[in-house]
Amino acid sequence: MQLKFLLLTMVVFVASLNTALATGIQQEIKFEPGKSSATLEGTVLSGDRDEYTLAVKAGQVMSVLITSGENNAVFQIYRQVAGSWKPLKGADEEDEATKWKNKLPGKGNEHLKIVVGGKRGNATYTLEVAII
């Protein structure tokens, strides 16, 4: 009985350690002076998410493209509304977006978050973000 309890305790500990270590990256996207696009490269581990934030102006047109060697990287785009994050049409979790282009909603300055994940396993990706 003690052995089962000890094994169960170890399994829970290892699972919580893996969850604690799987944090992904969090980075702000800033365009270089005179540029209106950025290219970012990364690897997201299975079950993890990388998060990129950026400041934009409502009414601008933004395009996002993600490519990966195994075609398994996807993204979601969220807009901050009244303190919470709301998905943009065509870039929600169920969309499994790999490309997106649209006029940005809202009024004035807006904050967006692009969340990158893998459909299966780890995903090495290139993320291109442009304001057109």
Image: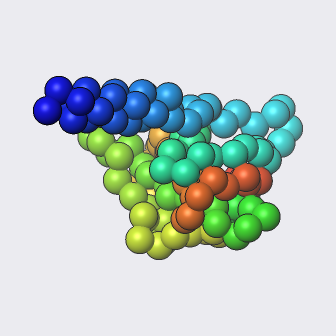
Say which residue appears at 81% left-offset and 33% top-offset. 32
Is residue 104 visible to us here?
no
**Residue 6 shown left or right of residue 26 in the figure:** left
Vertical placement of 6 versus 44: above or below?
above
Q: Quadrant of the N terminus?
A: top left
Q: Nearer the viewer, residue 73 or 58?
A: 73
Color theme of the render = rainbow
- In this view, the residue farthest toward the right is 34
Q: Nearer the viewer, residue 102 or 69?
A: 69
Say which residue appears at 64% left-offset and 66% top-offset. 72
Query: To which quarter of the image does residue 81 belong?
Result: top left
| Label total for image | 0
Q: Position of residue 131 (x, y in %)?
A: 70, 53
Is residue 1 visible to us here?
yes
Q: Quadrant of the C terminus?
A: bottom right
- In this view, the residue farthest toward the left is 1
Query: To which quarter of the image does residue 14 belong?
Result: top left
**Residue 90 shown left or right of residue 100 in the figure:** left
Q: Position of residue 46 (x, y in %)?
A: 55, 51
